[in-house]
Amino acid sequence: MVGMVVTSLCALAALALFALLGGGANFFVCVGLAVLPVPIMVATVLLLDRLEPEPARDLLFAFLWGAGVAVLGALILNTVGLKYVTEPVFGEQGRFWTTVVGAPVVEEALKGAVLFVLLWFRRNEIDGVTDGIVYATMVSLGFAMMENISYYLEALDDGGAQRLEAVFLLRGLVAPFCHPLFTAMTGLGVAYAANRRTGRVTALVAGLLAAMLLHGLWNGGTLMGVGGLAVVYLLDFCILVVLLTLIFLERRALVRQIGHYLPAYLRTGLVSPQDIAMLGQMPLRREARRWARSIGGKGAARAMSDYQLAATELVLLHKRMDNGVIDVPFFARRRGELLRLMGIARQALALSRIHAGPVAPPPWGPSGFAPPPG
């Protein structure tokens, strides 16, 4: 709660500062343009994260950190660095060095800081590559949204509407994924550190340095004209493809792990072979939620979502135990919680079937979520 309040206040302070600098209707126009791509980007992130969604409060905290703490910190440190470091040392080249070196170091350190906070306090929520990328993307979207406001205001001041259109085309439409891509490198390091016992510090440092390097290359490319921008854009696009491939491979591995770990729980009655098959296929998971809604409305659909999430979390818990990153007492306690949640969800769905009267059996198999006998 404290973190939410602090980050929100920082975001409001940044907006107030931009409003003072921009003034009038220009400020609201620039805010609207900066916000425009954010819902699409957030929806895309949530789509990538749909197999094992992260807590909404953690995603919101990351976004607000980027929009508040990171933006204010970068504004102060970049300004101070330009005035007292790069300009005195490099003279007329001071702004170039701030853009290519200073800003990437400051901004990626500030964005990455929230990932380190989550690693320290919410380590058990970071289950793999996808989670690291998702959190990195959320903090970067918040940062990019606020930074774009300042860029759009500056464009209006420098060249009017025509200049604003060019800057919006580049930052809002052509390359909105750049900030998330940079910080995703830090996210990869954090994901490794959360799921491995060795090489954690190396992974964190390497991820942060890679984020700074990619950011610096992009900023340098924007100063080298269309040719330089095209080269770094192509590089970033290739890295984006690699990241999406990693997410796809991790999801496929998780599906295999569902079939590996969950059969051990057949004797508990909390899963059946048909349920395991359903949990391992995204189309069947969606069909299961639709079926639950048809028999019991939103409550039953929520119960099915809870069941699917708890079962997936159980598989990931086993994976973390096998990797040696959690101890036996935590494993036993958390497994008990997840099994209880699965039991409650199954009972709710079974009761929904009774109250609904004659209904079609679950589409993934006749034995799944059967009402209790008698």
Image (tube, rainbow, N blue to C red):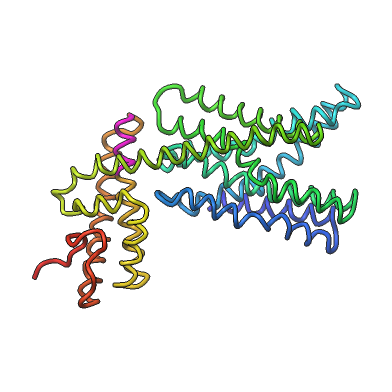
Q: How many marks?
A: 0
The residue sitting at the left extreme is 374
As displayed, is residue 179 above or below residue 221? Answer: below
Residue shown at 63% from the left, 54% from the top: 38
Q: Indicate the quadrant where residue 81 lies.
A: top right
As displayed, is residue 201 above or below residue 253? Answer: above
Q: Position of residue 47 (x, y in %)?
A: 49, 52
Q: Position of residue 174 (x, y in %)?
A: 70, 46
- Is 22 situated left or right of 216 in this image? right
**Which residues make up the magenta segment?**
315-323
Q: Is residue 308 magenta?
A: no
Q: Position of residue 28 (x, y in %)?
A: 78, 62
Q: Indicate the quadrant where residue 270 lies.
A: bottom left
- Is 100 situated left or right of 66 in this image? right
**Which quadrant holds the C terminus?**
bottom left
Residue shown at 51% from the left, 22% from the top: 202
- Is 72 situated left or right of 117 in this image? right
Residue shown at 84% from the left, 55% from the top: 22
As displayed, is residue 161 above or below residue 316? Answer: below
Q: Position of residue 154 (x, y in %)?
A: 84, 48
Most common SS among magenta residues: helix
Q: Is residue 322 magenta?
A: yes
- Is 186 situated left or right of 318 in this image? right
Residue shown at 22% from the left, 64% from the top: 347
